[in-house]
Amino acid sequence: MTELIDLVLLGMLAITALRIIFLKDLFAVVMLFGIYSFLSALIFVNLDAVDVAFTEASVGAGISTVLMLGTLALTGRKEKTNNHTTFLPLLVVVITGAALIYGTLDMPPFGDPDNPAQQHVAPRYIQDSPQEIGLPNMVTSVLASYRGFDTLGETAVVFAAAIGVLSLLGLPKHEKAAIESGLKSHLVLRVVAKLIVPLTLLFALYVQFHGDYGPGGGFQAGVIAAAAIILYALVFGLPMATHVIQPTLLKALAAIGVLIYAGTGFASFFLGGNFLDYNVLASDPVAGQHIGIILIELGVGVTVFAAMLSIFYAFAGQAERANIQ
Amino acid sequence: MFEQHSPVLPIILPLIAAPICILLGRSQLAWLFATFISALGFGISIGLMLTTLDQGVLSYSLGGWEPPWGIEVRVDAASALVLCVVTGISSLVLVYAKESIAKEIDSSQHTLYYTAHLLCLAGLSGILSTGDAFNLFVFLEISSLATYTLVSLASDKRCLTAAFRYLIMGTIGATFILIGVGMMYMKTGTLNMLDLAARISEYDSSRTLNTGLAFILVGVSIKLALFPLHMWLPPAYTHAPSAVSAFLASTATKVAVYVMVRFIFTIYGAEYVFHTMGMDTILLVLAIVAIFKCSFMATVQSNVKTVLAYSSVAQIGYMILGISLVSTLGLTAGLLHIFNHALMKGALFMAVGAVLLRTGSVDIKAFQGLGKQMPLTMAAFTIAGLSIIGVPLTAGFVSKWYLVTAALEQQEWTVAFLVLAGSLLAIIYVGRILEAAYFKNPAEGTTYKEAPLLMLIPLWILVFANIYFGIDTSMSVGAADTAAQWLTQPSSSPATALSVNMGGATQ
Amino acid sequence: MSFIVDYYNYWIVVFLMMAGFYIVISANNLVKKIVGLNIFQTSVFMLYISIGNVSGGSAPIVADGITRYSNPLPHVLILTAIVVGVATTSVGLALIVRIKRAYGTVEENEFEDKDDLI
């Protein structure tokens, strides 16, 4: 059954990808990309990767699509026809694809529990992490503890992206805007948004603190919280949103999140452990792991929320500027 | 108490300093702080180098989880050598940057510049010290994202298209590496480099592993700008702010060369890569084409930064040439050239940045008559240029010497001859600039002041290093030689090292 | 037949990867290039998740009565990679916005003509 669903979804993905190649309307391309992302999230669910599906849905179909649409608003929605030769790219792709197919011929069979990937390192995470870390969600255990250094790097990447976008686009000035923006005149939207925004924020908090037990965690929570404010900004206008959460505050928050994470690592230093060794944070190792994971997930959540929102602010500020001119 | 943590400090110090820079806000403070952190990292790296030369490998388990379950930071002589280069150049560039970016980058962006520089430094240090293949990808992306930002900070609009092209090529490269790592994981079930090495050696040959290696090599080749995948590099180095060009040209591509060395020698093993897959011939040919094609391109450019950028691609050819000779001596020459080339290219880009600051242009015409007007800058440029050519008593000569010796050791007479012939092209492209500076008269009525002291000091430190390491080679050659021994000895991979490794943080 | 059952997933994923890769290197419009890059990367994520799949397994969250779990490690790696992907995307899009402002176009062949791109 899993295989059948997998096959159908993969087929739909292939159709979507092919359609994107030939479409000239960029708005449709971005929308199809959102669909592509959602379909891959479904595949991830089907293949038991619930955390990944959650992230892909919120990031690929959510944030990425919003940012792409924001860019299109500034750059125009039509791709011009060009007389580029398509032969060379096609050749490169065919060669690369052939190399990959050659590589697959020797791969372990799909889904076989005896595959090397399932044998060596992974069994410890599955068998021992519930005792060593004390969390039912193995993905969170591996992410935050065994491979916590990767996640620190990931937080730094998000921070670096925020720095990059800020240096390129700058943050919108915090001022009472002269022009009326947003969709405030739509009564239905306004009422619904007022209802949804607090609920979304509540959900973000749930995802943040429930990530230890179910799918979720700092990253997903940060994105969802940012999405709530983005919705608010879309309906009530960017100036209102920047009034509620100021851009300069976001910049500081993005930095503080990384500091919380790295600071937790340094705390382990001073308590006599290695960097990011949470065992030493409390007298009982499992309790220590718990404290450490809550702290670093908080750091991730804060940085992701602040970085994603400030990136959105930067794009929206550009659009606002373009409207004024 | 920090002694035992020293392997991880060069990564996390800049990583934690970057957000602090943002919180400091004022660019003066950010500059002081970033320079201090970078210098601290340099000090620690030198300490690491001395320790590794003395005791061998240092291993540090992050989170206290022993590898391969946790991530390991692993510093040996090769990583420590490149780490010293990266942190050292970073510190000098930061000192230099204060005056240099004042004119080239909008003043509201200065704090962001220092933050991005620190992030890039953290990423590069992470690549150099990590012992985990996936972790390497993460740090590669930190440094890449910071690099795109740094390149796009220049005021010239062409930096934007350069940065975009860099971003597309760089991301394709990183994704290729990701595919390769996935294939390795699929066959071995592990991500730790040593563990991978042990498990890969159990396979004689496997299509999946071969494809994985091919993707990793192509991905890394994009990152290190190996001909013909170098197209992103010349625009990026030409249009980036001078301080950024100086930093990237002497560190980023070198780190990518290091990654290639790591994957070839530590993970797959030279035997597998060169004999089973025959990569040595491919690399050798590409390296030689890179040397000639790009040296030639350098001789016909009018923008001096572009000349230096093409020269960089050619010099990378020399490093790959050393690796492709498949011998300890060849690898020594390649590693040595990483070190020496950082000294020369750093100095050359710094000198050009000083000229840009004073004359407002980097066109070869702007150099006319500068020999008299900016004597210190141009003297530095001349010495570093001689080093690129490979004139005796400079660091460049030592690299060339070892390359030629390594080629002769393998009876590769043609290769040895081509290395020397490549230097002739270097004489032309360096000579053109020197001719303009010393034998042409300046345009009417233009007088330029000498560069400010804060730029001259780091520049001249590098120039002295070029001379020092050209005369006293014991330190640089010793380190490169130890590193190459370590990488090529068969026992550095599987069993013995892994048992050391199991001790985890105890070392 | 078992050959196809064993590998069909990888083959389609390779096709998707190459579709994305083709868009990146052939598209003339910069926004479309970024879309292609995302498709390329998302498809690589599918390769990783396929590696970790265990038929008859369950999501790697401890629950009563379940004995076989999927491999959590590829999930963790891909969580990180997704974040890296969105970071690259946002910087790339920001560059596009600036390029549009500086050049007045986001079609690659149009600004190459005006510019001495080397």
Image (cartoon, coloured by chain):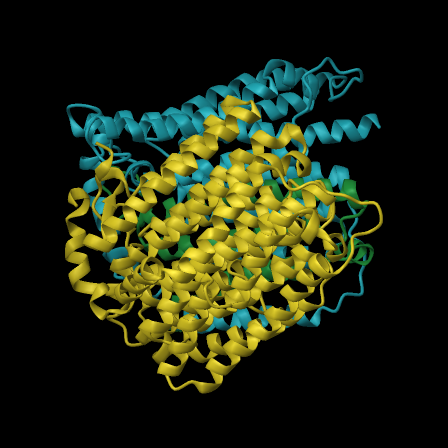
Chain colours: A cyan, B yellow, C green
Residue plotted at (72% across, 60% down): B436
Residue plotted at (36% across, 69% down): B331
Residue plotted at (51% across, 73% down): B287
User: Where residue B312 sits: x, y (%)?
Assistant: 56, 61
Closer to the camera in the image, A303 or B131: B131
The answer to whether one can see residue C66 in this image is yes
**Is B386 placed left or right of B155 in the picture?**
left
Name above or below for residue B323 compared with residue C62: below
Residue plotted at (36% across, 30% down): A262
Name above or below for residue B17 compared with residue B503: above
User: Where residue A234 sits: x, y (%)?
Assistant: 68, 24
Closer to the camera in the image, B396 or B308: B396
Name which quarter of the figure residue C22 lies in.
bottom right
The answer to whether one can see residue B171 in this image is no
**Is A174 placed left or right of B19 in the picture?**
right
User: Where residue B308 sits: x, y (%)?
Assistant: 62, 59
For the image, the number of numbered tags is 0
Closer to the camera in the image, B450 or B389: B450
Name which quarter of the figure residue B149 lies in.
top right
Name above or below for residue A50 compared with residue B466: above
User: Where residue C85 sits: x, y (%)?
Assistant: 52, 45
> In the picture, which quadrant includes the N terminus of chain A?
bottom left
**Is A180 placed left or right of B41 in the picture?**
right
Closer to the camera in the image, A301 or A255: A255
> In the picture, which quadrant includes the C terminus of chain A?
top right
Name above or below for residue B33 compared with residue B430: above
